[in-house]
Image (cartoon, grey):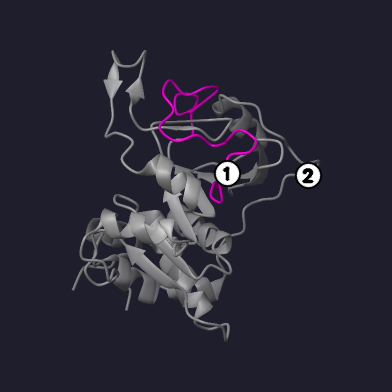
């Protein structure tokens, strides 16, 4: 059980995880890549919620976790299962994300003489094409990261007409807000702004244009039931693969 007190104020990471859980409603199986503690917590929360709704319990696979993945060959099994339609949701980030939902995992500047090099595209483009719900995330919401046009397209957010593409983005979650992806027009729309932040702040820190509703909602904070799940079974589970994150956010040490 988490050591976090019941009356502990809600942390931003808990709001992000709860928002992710909502984006995963109805998903059968979700995969979480490496270095993704908040998506992992959100997926595990969605699993806990699915287990109390009377329907089948969502399956969650977290790369790098022995306890929360049945795979023995990591990415190879993920790619194979995704290609056969067995993965309903995945998460992608990038050094840059633009208004067309393109992501850049290679670097900044003119390729191949990039000024800054990142980890590389790996299987991002493939998964972006075949996984039906891809949630983009970036925890530094700034004009440096959310740009008008990425310097290198590791994975494209859109495809030309006639290209078979069952997968693609559904949302972009940042430390300031939640954007909804509008596939029909190829453009983001602001869905909600997180507590403590404003529409003006989002506009000022975003390098691309986006649609804005007449009234901008505030992102919902997790209720008492969700907080209990996050600070209990979710914290215990995520500590298996992200002990530092579990300690920092939930006060939970790995077993």
Give the labeled residue for mark 2. 215
Toward which corner of the image does residue 243 lie, by quadrant?
bottom left
Q: SS at mark 2?
A: loop
Does residue 135 appear to the left or right of 234 in the view shown? Answer: right
Camera-nearest residue between 182 and 172: 182
At x 44%, y 65%, the residue is 86
* Residue 101 can be seen, yes or no: yes
The residue closer to the viewer here, 1 or 68, is: 68
Where residue 198 sits in the image (x, y, percent)?
63, 38
Left or right of residue 193, residue 9 in this image:
left
Left or right: 240 in relation to 22: left
- Tell me which label, 2 or 1, sits earlier in the chain: 1
Residue carrying label 1: 177
Q: Is residue 187 above or below residue 31?
A: above
Which class describes the residues within 10 Å of circle 2: few (<14), some (14-19), or many (20+)?
Answer: few
Q: Main secondary structure of the magenta part?
A: loop
Is 40 a magenta residue?
Answer: no
At which x and y percent is residue 226? 51, 72
| Residue 37 vs residue 15, the one in the foreground | 37
Residue 135 locus on image (x, y percent):
50, 50
- Magenta stretch encompasses residue 148: yes
- The quarter in which the N terminus is drawn is bottom left
The residue positioned 54% from the left and 46% from the top of the image is 168
How far apart marks 2 and 1 lie (CA) works out to: 14 Å
Q: Which residues, given as a range, are shown in magenta?
A: 141-170
């Amino acid at each position: 059980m988490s050591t976090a007190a019941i009356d502990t104020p809600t942390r931003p990471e808990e709001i992000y995880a709860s928002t992710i859980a909502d984006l995963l409603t109805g998903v059968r199986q979700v995969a979480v890549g490496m270095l993704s503690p908040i998506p992992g917590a959100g997926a595990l929360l969605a699993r806990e919620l699915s287990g109390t709704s009377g329907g089948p319990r969502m399956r969650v696979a977290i790369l790098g976790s022995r306890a929360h993945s049945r795979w023995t060959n990591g990415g190879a099994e993920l790619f194979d299962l995704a290609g056969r339609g067995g993965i309903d949701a995945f998460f992608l980030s990038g050094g840059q994300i633009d208004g067309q939902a393109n992501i850049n995992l290679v670097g900044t500047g003119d390729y191949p003489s990039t000024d800054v090099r990142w980890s590389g595209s790996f299987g991002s483009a493939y998964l972006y094409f075949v996984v039906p719900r891809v949630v983009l995330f970036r925890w530094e919401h700034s004009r440096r990261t959310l740009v008008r046009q990425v310097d290198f397209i590791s994975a494209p957010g859109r495809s030309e007409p006639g290209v078979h593409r069952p997968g693609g983005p559904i949302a972009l979650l940042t430390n300031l807000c939640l954007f909804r992806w509008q596939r029909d027009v190829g453009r983001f729309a602001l869905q909600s702004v997180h507590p403590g932040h404003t529409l003006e702040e989002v506009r000022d820190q975003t390098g691309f244009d986006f649609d804005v509703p007449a009234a901008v909602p505030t992102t919902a904070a997790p209720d008492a039931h969700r907080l209990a799940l996050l600070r209990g079974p979710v914290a215990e589970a995520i500590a298996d693969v992200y002990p530092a994150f579990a300690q920092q956010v939930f006060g939970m040490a790995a077993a």
